[in-house]
Structure formats: structure tokens, C-alpha cells
Amino acid sequence: MRGLGDRVILVASLMALLALNLPALVVIVLCYLWIGLNETAAIVAVAFNKIALVLVTMREGARTLDRPVAEMAKVYRMRFPARLRHVILPQLAPYISSAARGGLSIIWKLVLMIDYLLIQPSEIRARRWCGQAV
């Protein structure tokens, strides 16, 4: 069973590596081609671009967990919710905040780019007629 877990981790790492190396604009265009020019494609493109970054950051945080502290919590028979709250989450907090900050700093730029790509020519004319910026 241990070998199966290693294979799953290897496949997940390869998929994350592929997702991290694809440019955002390529993913957006491919989602538009495969799903269509709608908001679902935009949401899928943004999620695909940033989930890999967040997962890699959280995986690195999980690798740096202090094992002796976790073993001590087991020795003192802490239940899992208490162990999660007092042992695991405090160690993962810097990685959670880093992943959130990194994800949000890029997502808003992607959303602006997607919004610009979704504007139809008739909407541009209407916005110009109303005096709104395009």
C-alpha cells in the first residue's frame, strides 16, 4: 500500500509541475476554446492557474511539520480536533497566509484580463456611447 501512496504523490507532483509551467494566457484561451466564451470558462481558468500554486505551498508546509511535537500530542492522547487546533494549524499558519497572499495577488490580475477578453465589440460601443471607460 505504501507504493500506491508514493505513486499518487508522484503523479500529483507531475500534474502540479505541469500546471505551474503553463502560462496563464494559454490556460485562459484553452478554457475558452474547450468550454466556450462564458463565465464558467473564466472560473475554471483562474482556478486551474492558482490551485497548483496553493497546493505546492501547502505541501511544503506539510513537509516541514515538526514530527516530535505531533508524536508528543499522540502520547498525551490529544483528540484530533485539539491536535489540529493546537499543533498542526499553528505550524501551517505561515504557509496558509503565504499561499493566500500569493494566490490573491495574481488572481485579481487574471480576472481583469479575463474580463477584458470577454467584452464583446457591441459592449465596447455601448460603453463608449455612455461615456464609460473600456
Image (cartoon, rainbow, N blue to C red):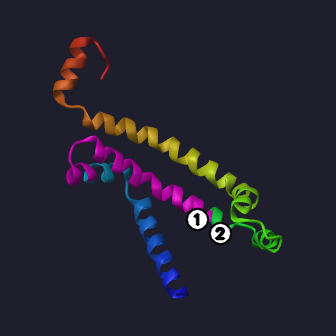
The quadrant where residue 60 appears: bottom right
Percent position (x, y) of residue 58?
Answer: 59, 60
Q: Secondary structure at mark 1?
A: helix
- Residue at position x 75%, y 61% from top? 87
Residue 77 magenta: no
Check disc 1: other Cα within 10 Å, few if <14, some if 14-19, many if 20+.
some
Image vertical order of residue 25 relative to residue 112, above or below: below
Marks 1 and 2: CB-CB under 8 Å?
yes
Residue 22 vertical position relative to residue 9 in the rendered view, above or below: above
The spot of residue 55 in percent (x, y) is 52, 60
Image point (71%, 66%), residue name: 65
Residue under label 2: 63
**Nearest to the observer: residue 120 or residue 96:** 96
- Name the magenta segment's main secondary structure: helix
Q: Give amino acid for label 1.
A: Arg
Q: Is residue 96 left or right of residue 85?
A: left
Q: What x and y, as percent, mark residue 4?
A: 48, 84
Residue 34 included in the magenta stretch of the image: yes
Quarter containing the C terminus: top left
Q: Which residue is denoted by mark 1 in the rendering? A: 59
- Residue 91 appears left or right of 53: right
Indicate the position of residue 59 as horizontal and vertical percent values: 58, 65
Real-space Cα distance between discs 1 and 2? Answer: 6 Å
User: Which residue ends up furthest to the left in the rendered image?
Assistant: 122
The three-letter amino acid code for the residue at tag 2 is: Arg
* Residue at x 20% of width, y 47% of height: 36
At 57% from the left and 47% from the top, the residue drawn is: 100
Number of other residues with Cα within 10 Å of mark 2, as a class: few under 14, some 14 to 19, many 20 or more: few
Say if 4 sits above or below 74 in the image: below
What residue range appears in magenta? 31-60
Per the image, label 2 sits on a secondary structure element best described as helix
